[in-house]
Image (tube, grey):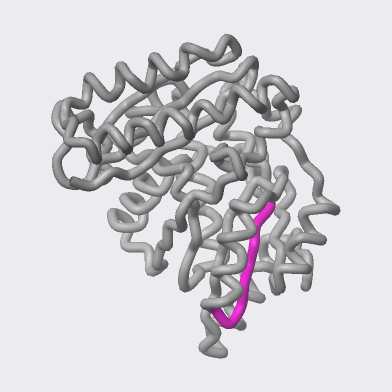
Amino acid sequence: MEVIRDIKEMQAIARAMRMADKTIGFVPTMGALHKGHLGLIRQAVKENDISVVSIFVNPIQFGPQEDFRRYPRPLSKDLALCRKAGVDFVFCPRPQDFYPSGYKTFIEVKELSDALCGACRPGHFRGVVTVVAKLFNILQPSCAYFGQKDAQQAVIIKKMVSDLNMPVKLKVMPIIREKDGLAFSSRNIYLSREQRKDAAVLSAALHIAGNLVKSGIRDAHKIIRKIKGVIKAKKAARIDYVSIVDPDNLRPVKKITGRCLIALAVWIGKTRLIDNIIVTV
């Protein structure tokens, strides 16, 4: 496994691999790797000739009051996990190279970026889309892998790839959860022992919502109200949003028909966690 920091060197390596007719599987991350990331990485290694993982804590997707400075950066541990998983290259660009002095170019996906997390994190998805577009330009991968936990991000990046005619295939992999149902997240390490117990309420509430849909309830408002009631029972929990939307355009639905995304964001203490499920009727 090679660790590459220089952008031009990474471009040259990727170009050489493509010229040799090698497929490149790419997993973009901000590091602090967990089992969710490793599921994506193993899939990329399995399905492609060459695997690349990027580790870059992207400053432009954090708001002024968010956790950029304290975001975990256990690089040595991350590299060991990548090596064990069989990764070929880890790309760790330097921030000053990625966004040099005078950098002025950003990409936005209108409307989709304003819903759900975008409503309370203005500018977040502009930062996400911009960094992913730059990484795609540098690597030009055959296939890129994302997790369903970040459902809105996946929808937005799919739209960017389609609108900008990017020749990359996207795969969105299922959420990987801990034994009590909590979705793996790099931010879970912020939780105290008691908060960690309370955080399981996110998946528990979504499980209850799924069962309500299976029982025949189709009124989105009733299901949202039930989810909120379950979450509010935990003292450490503060709801950011609970929404039921079309999984393709992220518009709210009043009645559950076909496929719907039930998504939520909840503060557990000072840590904001997201989760979701897809229901089909």
Q: Which residue lies furthest to the right in this view?
A: 76
Residue 53 magenta-highlighted: yes
Q: Is residue 226 left or right of residue 34?
A: left
Residue 266 seen = yes
Q: Residue at x 33, y 31 (%)?
A: 209
In front: 275, or 281? 281
Q: Position of residue 183 (x, y in %)?
A: 55, 41
Image quadrant assignment for residue 245: top left
Residue 246 magenta-highlighted: no
Q: Residue at x 51, y 88 (%)?
A: 21
Question: Main SS of the magenta segment?
Answer: strand
Q: Where is residue 146 in the image (x, y as percent from the top left)?
A: 49, 54
Image quadrant assignment for residue 267: top right
Q: Which residue is drawn at 68% across and 29% down?
A: 68
Q: How many marks?
A: 0
In front: 223, or 25? 223
* Residue extent of the magenta highlight: 48-55
In front: 190, or 256? 256
> Is 111 located above or below residue 159 in the figure?
above
Q: Where is residue 153 in the image (x, y as percent from the top left)?
A: 43, 43
> Is 5 located above or below residue 105 in the figure?
below
> Is 168 located above or below residue 106 in the figure?
below
Residue 97 seen = no
